[in-house]
Amino acid sequence: MTRVAAIDCGTNSIRLLVADADPSTGEFVELDRRMEIVRLGQGVDRTGRLAPEALERTFAACRQYAAVIKEHGAQRIRFVATSASRDAENRDDFVRGVLEILGVEPEVISGDQEAEFSFTGATKELAGRDHLAKPYLVVDIGGGSTEFVVGDDHVRAARSVDIGCVRMTERHLVRDGVVTDPPEDGQIAAIRADIDAALDLAEESVPLAGAATLVGLAGTVTTIAAIALGLEEYDSEAIHHSRISFEQVREITGRLLGSTHAERAAIGAMHPGRVDVITSGALILLAVMERTGAREVVVSEHDILDGIGWSIA
């Protein structure tokens, strides 16, 4: 067994997984998994730069993670950075800060690499489970981008497009620095137009309607699952591999669209950092299910983090 530490730094959150992995047997034992909302991508869509306060929030989380990694004695560390740091002009500031704190340089990976890791992490344990048919369509809804990957045992096609819950919120729902609450019809229509255009792009590379099983990843999907399951607080074990119907996603999206900040914040399973962006994320998931014709989404708590872990094991 090799003890690995995988870090995924996205537009909205930074997450850590420490695990023991044995590629020869496929055994993967999770020791520690945690997440902090740092909003690294704050304002990137508008300014093209990482904000100083966003960098400091991210570095503070890195310091916490460095202590956890040291405590567990991880032998190998890999730090992967995604959409926000790909887009930023001052990404060198980000790279230097992470290197100083963790001793490893963040890898600013491409959308295709991101998709490969997400697919591996999400599907490695699905084989033979609940008679889930192949091929899988794995959809990873992030803060700045969404990845679409089709495959069975291996990736057949993948595409990353620039729609995410933070990007859509900042682009269409923020006025004078404040999120419109609840969103207006015109704002919702603008988000849907961006999503539909992005899905058209994705379909140029990935046969979205050709998969047998839709697998959904990341905080938007898991939060919607928690709401659908009626959880009073977030429970990853209950959420992992739950199956949420199209009707449930449509109903919850409608409910979120009509809610205020206070009403969303009062949802027991809602992370405070998702209160303002969950509506845009729900619109993305709903549009994906409409486009693909999927009657349900299989929700996975295992995602790009697990794929990164396997890549260094």
Image (cartoon, helix red, strand yellow):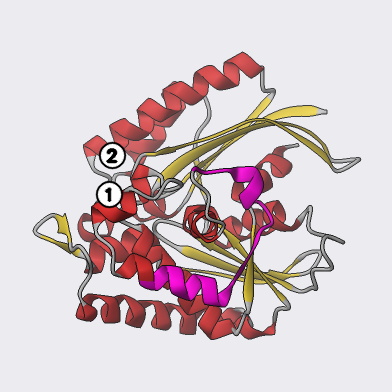
244 in magenta: yes
Residue that carries the numbered disc 1 in the rendered image: 42
Which residue type carries mark 2?
Ala
| Residue 298 point in image, percent of width and height | 66, 64
Is 130 situated left or right of 109 in this image?
right
Is 249 situated left or right of 171 in this image?
right
What residue is shown at x 35% (from left), y 39% (from top)?
A: 38
Toward the viewer: 291 or 194? 291
| Residue 29 point in image, percent of width and height | 76, 33
What residue is shown at x 38% (from left), y 59% (from top)?
A: 278
| Residue 28 point in image, percent of width and height | 78, 38
| Residue 207 point in image, percent of width and height | 64, 83
- The crowd level at tag 1 (other Cα within 10 Å; few <14, some 14-19, many 20+) is many
Is 86 situated left or right of 134 in this image?
left
What residue is shown at x 28% (from left), y 63% (from top)?
A: 259
Residue that extends furthest to the top in the rendered view of this protein: 71
Asked whether the residues under the numbered discs 1 and 2 touch, taking CB atoms below 8 Å apart as contact, a structural biologist would say yes
SS class of the residue under badge 1?
loop
Residue 306 visible, this orientation: yes
Residue that carries the numbered disc 2 in the rendered image: 54
Q: Is residue 122 above or below residue 168?
A: above
Residue that extends furthest to the right in the rendered view of this protein: 25
Mark 1 or 2, nearer chain start = 1
Please state the extent of the stretch shown in magenta in the rendering: 233-254
What residue is shown at x 40% (from left), y 77% (from top)?
A: 195
Is 288 situated left or right of 47 in this image?
right
- The crowd level at tag 2 (other Cα within 10 Å; few <14, some 14-19, many 20+) is some
Q: Is residue 156 above or below residue 11?
A: below
